[in-house]
Image (tube, rainbow, N blue to C red):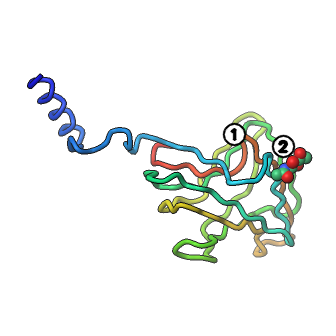
């Protein structure tokens, strides 16, 4: 008993952990959180006159960072016209109204796409506004459905 306690302590020390570190809250965990929504699929339609919100509830005691990502399976249907660059604006948080990223929602015919828009310190409720960029010639539109495995997600943890 003494020797197994000793070797566990030695292992934890070698791993840079103290014996008090709860392993279950290790940063090796990734939680992928779908948007908060009254229903699915979420029908995102982003146009010069429609800038939808996307929001996420972050479970208590989550170990961050919280990364806003866009991902789509191969061949996922996304409709788009004109310039479809989308600006992502923080709602609430430390810098409300700040531009926190830009993204073109696109799928590829033969491979999944994964884009990290930005990473943040986690907060219990995180909300963003999606706006077509007006800095481009011919501001257009983009629309897609959010279903399981496709759309916007909050990846919680640094091993996502
Ligand atoms: C999105 O559109 C589909 C029909 O295309 C509908 O069934 C679904 O309820 C819509 N989602 C929401 C959240 O309203």
47 or 121: nearer the eye? 121
4 or 73: nearer the eye? 4
Question: In the picture, residue 29 is in which quadrant?
Answer: top left
Q: Give the percent coordinates (x, y) of residue 71.
A: 68, 45
Mark 1: secondary structure: loop
Q: In the visual, does 61 lie left or right of 41?
A: left
Residue placed under numbered mark 1 in the picture: 149
Q: Residue furthest left?
A: 2
Quick one: quadrant of the N terminus? top left
Disc 2 packing (10 Å; few <14; some 14–19; many ≥20): some
Q: Which residue is at a point 18% across and 39% down the rendered structure image?
A: 13
Residue placed under numbered mark 2 in the picture: 77
Is 81 situated above or below 135?
A: above
Q: Which residue is at a point 81% across and 56% down the rendered structure image?
A: 44
Disc 1 packing (10 Å; few <14; some 14–19; many ≥20): few
Number of marks in the rendered image:
2
Q: Give the percent coordinates (x, y) of residue 33.
A: 60, 47
Please tell me which of labels 2 and 1 falls first in the chain.
2
Q: Which residue is at a point 47% across and 48% down the rendered structure image?
A: 157
Q: Give the percent coordinates (x, y) of residue 85.
A: 75, 63
113 or 55: nearer the eye? 55
Is 158 situated above or below 126?
A: above
> Residue 40 has which mark?
none
Q: CA distance from mark 2 to mark 1?
A: 13 Å
Mark 2: secondary structure: loop
Q: Nearer the viewer, mark 2 or mark 1?
A: 1
Is 12 situated above or below 135?
A: above
Is 8 situated above or below 85?
A: above
Confirm or reject: label 1 Cβ below 8 Å from ligand 1. Answer: no
């Amino acid at each position: 008993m003494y020797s197994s306690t000793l070797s566990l302590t030695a292992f934890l020390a070698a791993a840079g952990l103290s014996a008090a570190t709860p392993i279950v809250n290790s940063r090796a965990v990734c939680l992928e959180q779908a948007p908060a929504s009254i229903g699915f699929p979420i029908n995102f339609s982003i146009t010069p006159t429609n800038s939808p919100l996307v929001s996420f509830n972050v479970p208590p005691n989550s170990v961050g960072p919280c990364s806003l990502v866009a991902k789509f399976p191969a061949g996922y249907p996304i409709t788009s016209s004109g310039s479809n660059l989308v600006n992502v604006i923080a709602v609430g948080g430390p810098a409300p109204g700040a531009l926190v990223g830009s993204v073109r929602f696109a799928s590829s015919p033969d491979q999944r796409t994964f884009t990290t828009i930005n990473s943040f310190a986690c907060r219990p409720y995180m909300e963003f506004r999606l706006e077509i960029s007006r800095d481009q010639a011919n501001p257009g539109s983009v629309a897609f459905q959010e279903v399981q495995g496709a759309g916007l997600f909050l990846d919680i943890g640094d091993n996502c």
